[in-house]
Image (tube, grey):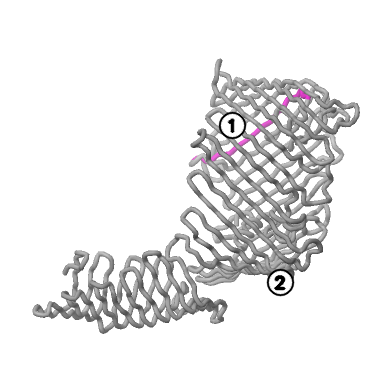
Amino acid sequence: WQSPANDLIVIEADSATALPEQNTAEFQGNVVIHHPKQTVYANQLHFDNQRQLIKADQELLIQLRDLRLLGSQAWFDLNRHKGEMSQVSYRIPSRKARGEAGRMALLDKDHSRFENISYTTCPPGNRGFVLSAESMDIDQKNQIGTFRAAKLRFLGVPIFYAPTLTVSLDDSRKSGLLVPSLGYSSKNGADITVPYYFNLAPNYDATFMPRLLSKRGLLLGGEFRFLTPSHNGRLLAEILPDDRLYEGNSTRGALRARTHSNLGQVTPGLAADLDLNWVSDQGYLDDLGQSLAVTSTRHLRNRAALSWRNRNWDAVAELRHYRTLDDSILSEDRPYSLLPRMAVHWLQYQGPAGLDYSLAGEVSNFYREDSVTGLRVDLKPRVSLPWRRNWGFIEPALNARYTSYSLDGQLPGQSSSPSRSTYSISLDSGLMFDRDVTWFGRDMTHTLEPRAYYLYTPYKKQSDIPLFDTSYLDFNFSNLFHDNRFNGPDRVGDANQLTLALTSRVLSGSDGRELLNASIGQIYYFEDRRVTLLDDEPINTSSSSVIAELTTGIFDHWLLRAGVQVDPHADTRVQQGLAQASYRGDSGERLHASWRLREGTLEQTDLAAYWPVSNKIGLIGRWYYSVEERHDLETVAGIEYGDCCWRIRAVWRRYLDSNGTEYNNTALLQLELNGLGKLGNNIDNFLDRTIYGY
C-alpha cells in the first residue's frame, strides 16, 4: 500500500484475509507494519486502505526512532493524522526513560495528548522518583511539552506540585521556571531562589531571580543577555528593598554590566570592552554574595577599553577605576585608578639582519585619594638575535627604557617631573642533552638542559619616583631569567648578575608526553643591588635564593608538584615552599593535599576529597587551615547518596568571612534526578572550586 505521503507501507503477517470489494484486509499472527518512520507490531490488525485506517483490538507495539509505545487497543487515521491508544506504556531509550499513560490521543500531525501520564528514568521496580500529571500536551512543531497538575514524588513523598509545567522536548531554550535553589546560612537564614527564564528571541534572553532570605527579606534579581555577530553582553541587577539585618540604609542593591564589541567593520582588529560594577554598600558582597570568589572581593573594578590588534601590533586605551570595599586596607595599599591608560606593543620576528625587534609604550594617568598622582610615560624598545639549534640556543639582547612623570602631591623638595633613562644587556644560552632509557618497564627519553643567563643594567637613582603599580617580582624559576627584578616601570633594578640553572625532563617514548620536569637555579651577583622599592639600604648578598621546582605525572592517577625557595643568607633558610599531591581514581575518587609557605606571611594546608565508598555513597570533605594563625579558613563536610536514577548531596560549610573576624555557616542541598535536572543549590560548581579535579 501507499500512504498519503506516497511512503511505501509493507505489512507482514502469518495469515491475511483480503476483502477487495471493501478495500480492506484482516491480518493475523505476528503482524509487522514497515513504514519509513516507524514499525508496528501486533497479533491482530485491521487495515482499511480506502480510509487509510488502522485498527488493533489487541496489544500493539509502535517502534519510532527514539520512542517505543505499547498499548492494549489502538486506531490510527493516516489521512487525518489522528488516533488513540489506551493503557499505554512507553520507553525513550536515549534518556533511559519510561512511563505510563491511561490514554494517548493523536490530535493532528504536530499535536498529541497523554492522559494520566507518569515519567521516570528509574528501572522497573525502582520508584525512586516519578513525575505524574493529569495530562501532557505535546507540540512537536515547537518542541514543547505542557503538563497539567504535575506532581513530583521522590521515594514516594510529594516534593513538588505545579498546576502547569512547560518543558522543552529538545535542547533549544524555552521560557519557563528553572530549577529552584535551596540553602541555609547562619548569616541569611533559609535561602530560596526560584528563577524564571524568558526566551525573548534567538539572540537575547532574560532571567528573573526572586531570592527569599528568611532573616533579611526578599531580594529581586534579574539578568539580561544578548548576542549579535559583533556584540555580546550580560547585565545583572539586584535589589533588596528592606534588609531587616542591615543597620544603614535598608535598601541595598548591586549592578553589573559586561559587554564585548567586535568593531572590525570600522577597522579590522578593533574591539571594545566594558565591565561596570556597583554595590550599594561595602558589605553587600560579603553579606549577599553567593560564592567564595565574590565574598572575598576587596576592590571593585570598573573598566572601559578600546583595543586594536593586527599581526605585529597590539594597542589599548582604557579607563580603570577601583573602589575599595574593606576600610581596614590602608590608603597606600589601595590600587591606583587609571584615568586613562594607553599602551601599544609592536613585535617583529626575523626583521632586518635576522634580528627580533619589539617596542612597548605606555601613557598612564594615575589617581588615588590622599596620594601622589600624575602622568607616566614609559617606552621600552628591545632588539635580540636568537640563534637556535636542536642541541641548544644562544640569544644576546639589548633593552632600553625611558620613563618620565608629571606629578601632583609630591613632598616638598621632590621633583614634580622626574625622569629616568637606562638600558640592559643580556645573554641567554642553553644546551640540550637527551638519551633513551627504559624505566619501570616503559620506554622514555631523559633530558638534561643546562642554562646560563647574564644580565647587566647600570644603576640609576630612582628614590624620587613614586610607586604607582610596581612591586618586587614574584621569585620563581621562570623569573630567574627576567630582565628586571621589579614588575612595573617605576623601578628598574641595577644588575650585574649571572643565572645558572638546570632542568631535567622525562618524556614518554610512545607519545612524547612530559612525565617529569625538575628544575633548579640561582642568581650570582657581582655587585650590590642599590635600587630598592623604598630607598632602603643596598642588598649586598652575593647570590639569590635557590629555586627548585618539580612536577611529575609519572605515577598512574597521581599528579605531584613541589617547589622551594631557600635563602642561604637568611636566618630562616626556607622562604617559600609548596607541595601538592592530586589523585584521580578510575571510580571517581578525587584527593588533593597541599601545603604552602611564604615566610612571615602565611603557612597554610589544604586537604580536600571526594571519595565513593560504595556504588551509592560518596563522602565530601575539605579542611583548609592556617598554620601561621592557628585557625581554620574553611571546613566542608558532605555526603552524597544515590541510586541509578537519582542522587542527593548534602554539604555543610564553615568559613571565615572576608574580614577574618567571624565564621559563617552554610548548608547546601541538591537533588539530582536523571532526565529531569537538579533541584536545590548548584553544589557541582561549589565542589569544582573546592576539590581539585572534581
Left or right of 258: which side holds 457? right
Q: Quadrant of residue 438?
A: top right
Q: Residue furthest left?
A: 21
Q: Residue furthest bottom?
A: 57
Left or right of 97: which side holds 350? right
Q: Position of residue 602 (x, y in %)?
A: 80, 48
Which residue is label 1 attached to?
314
Q: Quadrant of the N terminus?
A: bottom left
Most foreground residue, 5 or 531: 5
Q: Quadrant of the C terminus?
A: bottom right
Which residue is label 2 attached to?
214
User: Does residue 589 sit above or below 506 in this rendering?
Assistant: below
User: Magenta part mainly helix, strand or loop?
Assistant: strand
> How crowded is the residue under tag 2: few (<14 C-alpha within 10 Å), some, or many (20+)?
some
Q: Residue at x 53, y 34 (%)?
A: 269
User: Does residue 527 sit above or below 235 in this rendering?
Assistant: above
Most foreground residue, 625 or 138: 138
Q: Position of residue 394 (x, y in %)?
A: 61, 22
| Magenta stretch, residue numbers | 494-509
Q: Residue at x 79, y 54 (%)?
A: 626
Whether the magenta-drawn stretch holds residue 94 is answered as: no
> Helix, strand or loop at disc 1?
strand
Q: Quadrant of residue 190?
A: bottom right
Q: Residue at x 44, y 78 (%)?
A: 118
Q: Amino acid at mark 2?
A: Ser
